Image (cartoon, rainbow, N blue to C red):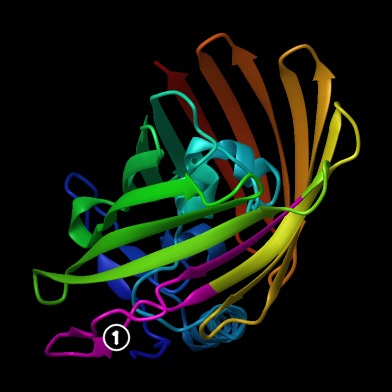
Amino acid sequence: MRKLSLSLKPIKFPGQRKNYYFDSQLGVLFKVHLFFGFEKPNSVKKFKIILIITLLSSVFSAYSRSNVFPTGSKPAAMGNAFISQYNPFAAYHNQAGLAGIEKTSVSLFYENRFFSPNVSLSHMASRALVATFPTGPGTFALQYNAFGPPQWAESNAGISYAMFLSDKLSAGIQLNYFASRLPEVNAWAMTAGFEAGFIYQVSEKTFAGLHVANPYTPEINTLSYRETIPWRIRAGGHTRFNEDFMFSYEIEKMEGYRSMLKLGGEWKAANNFFLRGGLNTSPARVFAGFGYEAGFVTIDLSFSNHYILGYVPSASVIFYL
């Protein structure tokens, strides 16, 4: 696996004079002067850059592929504590949650990481599409997501299947195909993986979920490095205390990262209108958002804040056909 380097690779985009810099571990694209207020730092300012990048590297894992995962805006507003819920965006959290989808649906998601007006939205955007197809015994789903501009784009396509194994237990599996564009060699690196999960109804009001992603993926080999997609294990649940309030909780462990605690809540403030919030640790992030259900359409918005890198807005829409 390729470790974090303190020298960031400059990338030029068409029609722009200044170099941008991309750090794949953070999923962050920036100009030096965005954070430091200068283009050509002197030795003292260079030291400050190295110091801050070193600080960031101690918080994030060191993989060349950025660990940017699409989530859906409802899960995002709840801190992505979504391991045990039934929703089309369960394709990105726990495929067992697709078993509860009763209608064909098409879902769209858009997120701009660490929003800055000085950087084109497309350079830091994460886009996703999920389509679900309920059948007699279970539900099929297709998903596609992409992050970044063509110069260093990352994408993932997958096919899922979920079904109820009993009245209280559902299971799901997804096969994934990963692709990353390597600007240093002007080529694509590709590999495959799989993920699977379960949801169990513990009581009338409480559900528990378990999910494992990429326990094994073929190694990516290039002239400059070798890499595998990191594995992830998530476990948690949610409890609905009454018709208007739900609380969700989850622990996530990803290869090379510290364990993360995720908490989220949803309050039905009015008919078809929901307010949401969430909290993550390691690193600390806070989340908020709202959603509105209008017949066959559900619209969700979310906002999160990283204490160092800034704000992440997102929006998603689900059409039930």
Q: Is residue 217 magenta?
A: yes
Question: Is residue 275 placed above or below 115 in the rendered structure?
Answer: above
> Residue 121: image x %, image y %?
39, 41
Tell me which residue sits at (40%, 31%) in the image. Answer: 108
Tell me which residue sits at (45%, 19%) in the image. Answer: 320
Q: Quadrant of residue 3?
A: bottom left
Of all residues shown, which one is farthest toward the left?
A: 186
Quadrant of the rendering where the C terminus is positioned: top left
Provide the secondary structure element on which disc 1 rests: strand
Left or right of residue 304: residue 270: right
> Residue 307: image x %, image y %?
71, 61
> Residue 38: image x %, image y %?
47, 65
Question: Is residue 124 placed above or below 73 in the rendered structure?
Answer: below
Q: Could you classify mark 1 by the number of other residues whose Cα lies within 10 Å: few (under 14), some (14-19), or many (20 or more)?
A: some
- Which is more toward the observer, 48 or 154? 154
The residue segment tinted magenta is 207-232
Question: Is residue 148 placed above or below 268 in the rendered structure?
Answer: below
Tell me which residue sits at (71%, 15%) in the image. Answer: 272
Which residue is identified by label 1? 227
Q: Is residue 71 magenta?
A: no
Quadrant of the rendering where the N terminus is positioned: bottom left
- Which is more toward the observer, 116 or 166? 166
Three-letter code, disc 1: Glu
Tell me which residue sits at (25%, 57%) in the image. Answer: 153
Residue 70 shows in this picture: no
